[in-house]
Image (tube, rainbow, N blue to C red):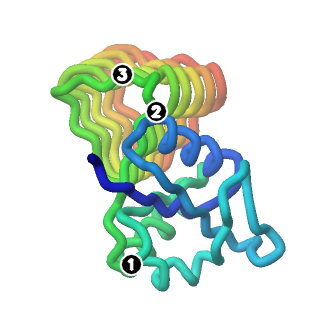
Amino acid sequence: MKSERSLLVLGAGGHGQAVAEAALLSGDWQRVLFVDDRWPQLTESSGIAVVGNLQSAAALSREVDAGIAAVGNNALRQRWQEALIAAQIPLGRVIHPRAWISPRAEIGGGCAVMAMAVVGTNARLGDGVIVNAGAIVDHDAVVADFAHLGVGVSLAGGVQVGAAAWLQAGCSAGYGVVIEPGLVIKPGQALIAKD
């Protein structure tokens, strides 16, 4: 029988709740705990216990198998993930059971791949990447560390997304497009490769 695995989710807001739910639905995690800076006023979120603030994460290192920083803000997610590493908490990955990941894709530590997302053949996700609900990362695309693909983003084959870039809901990028690090793309914008 598989032993119970526990995941510490940093952030109990909307994205954190979605990540916690996906973690439990996946069957990879049987127990989830939140830490959030609204504790001790906030003691539960979506029926899951909030057991401390972000500074208390290190004290929980023996109680959990891994942790994930679950906040949409790229810079904040990076800082929180660095705090997990400093606390010697291994980085977890959360893959919603209704997402599809190619067996040839590479998924970095601390990634969240949400419902109905697709990560194609030879695609690579760096550390701390969010692939939100319904987003597509097609074959050979690369999404660098702490980038965030919003709901319904579509990346064609070979797209390169720079570190900490944020593609908001409904964006699309055609074959071979390169998106610079830190760039924020407005909702629904289409990007095409320059000739």
Q: Nearer the viewer, mark 3 or mark 1?
A: 1
Which quadrant is home to the C terminus?
A: top left
Q: Which residue is mark 2?
A: 96
Q: Amino acid at mark 2?
A: His
**Viewer-proximal residue among 96 and 86:** 96
Q: Quadrant of residue 167?
A: top right
Q: Secondary structure at mark 2?
A: loop
Q: Amino acid at mark 3?
A: Trp
Q: Secondary structure at mark 1?
A: loop
How far is disc 2 from disc 3 in space, using C-alphas? 9 Å
Q: Secondary structure at mark 3?
A: strand
Q: Looking at the image, is 39 positioned above or below residue 159? A: below
Residue positioned 45% across, 50% down in the render: 30
Neighbour class for label 3 at 10 Å: few (<14), some, many (≥20)?
some
Closer to the N terminus: mark 3 or mark 1?
Answer: 1
Q: Which residue is mark 3?
A: 100
Check contact, mark 3 vs mark 1: CB within 8 A.
no
Q: Which residue is mark 1?
A: 62
**Viewer-proximal residue among 150 and 51:** 51
How far is disc 2 from disc 1 in space, using C-alphas? 25 Å
Drawn side of residue 35 relative to residue 180, left or right: right
Residue 163 visible in the shown view: no
Q: Indicate the position of residue 49 as horizontal and vertical percent values.
A: 67, 63
Q: Amino acid at mark 1?
A: Arg
Residue 13 visible in the shown view: yes
Neighbour class for label 1 at 10 Å: few (<14), some, many (≥20)?
few
Residue positioned 76% across, 71% down in the render: 38
Q: Nearer the viewer, mark 2 or mark 1?
A: 1
Residue positioned 49% across, 23% down in the render: 135
Closer to the N terminus: mark 2 or mark 1?
Answer: 1
